[in-house]
Amino acid sequence: MALTLAGAFRSELTIRKSRFLGCVQPVAGRPAAITIVEGLRSQHPGAAHVCWALLAGGQSAANDDGEPGGTAGRPMLEVLRHQQLEGVLATVVRYFGGVKLGAGGLVRAYTDAVAQALLQAEKLPLQRMLQLACSVPYALEGMVRRELQGAGALLGEVRHAAVVEIAFSVPEDSEPALRARLNEAGQGALAWCEPPS
């Protein structure tokens, strides 16, 4: 089962005068990850490197940020994979202390910075959300909203036209029971439609 993190968790290591500031945190995808990395660059203008690894399905990526190829981002990504994480960004900010660590030393330093942060991290089962939409007569809108709230669904766009079109996302494991309850309560007046993209 894939896991994600409850929040951001940090570590700090000093190895042969270089400081490594590690952080692991949940992210929605690559755009959010890039924003976080750019924020770290502006917070740490004196840092030599801001390396990162993102494990997020088809948006996964790793970046060595000027360190020798394969010594930072890829090893950090492997630590995340080994922990069966998904939707997680690992970053390590390095302040160079004047002593070169060599390729093996860099790999150990970057993986240790991520591993130390993960030791403190609270891991949660990853809940996949399904995007759904339905249309109902105005008289049933309140009932649908109550059912969605009771199922832990997140309300999306609601359009009022000839009927009320309601888009929402629901945890994957709650979807079958919610769909059955809505079908029964709608008594044939509820129609399922494509969620807006």
Image: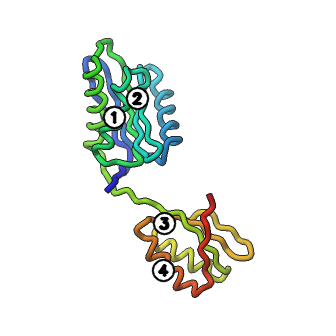
Q: Which of the two discs, 4 and 3, labels the residue nearer the N terminus?
A: 3
3D distance between C-alphas at marks 4 and 1: 43 Å
**Label 1, residues with CA under 10 Å away: few <14, some 14-19, many ≥20:** many
Residue at image point 59% right, 74% down: 192
Q: Residue furthest bottom?
A: 187
Element marked by disc 4: helix
User: Residue type at mark 2?
Assistant: Cys
Q: Is residue 102 left or right of residue 163?
A: left
User: Residue type at mark 1?
Assistant: Met
Element marked by disc 3: strand
User: Residue type at mark 3?
Assistant: Val
- Give the label on residue 180, or none: 4
Quadrant in the picture for residue 13: top left
Residue at image point 36% right, 51% down: 4
**Label 3, residues with CA under 10 Å away: few <14, some 14-19, many ≥20:** many
- Give the label on residue 51, or none: 2
Element marked by disc 1: helix
Residue under numbered circle 1: 76
Q: Are marks 1 and 3 in contact (CB under 8 Å)?
A: no
Residue at image point 47% right, 74% down: 150
Residue at image point 61% right, 66% down: 194
3D distance between C-alphas at marks 4 and 3: 13 Å
Return the residue nearer the eye: 152 or 57. Answer: 57
Residue under numbered circle 3: 170
Q: Position of residue 149 (x, y in %)?
A: 50, 71
3D distance between C-alphas at marks 1 and 3: 32 Å
Q: Which of the two discs, 3 and 2, labels the residue nearer the N terminus?
A: 2
Disc 4 versus disc 3: nearer the observer: 4
3D distance between C-alphas at marks 2 and 4: 47 Å
**Is 196 drawn above or below residue 27 in the view shown?**
below
Element marked by disc 2: strand
Q: Position of residue 148 (x, y in %)?
A: 51, 72
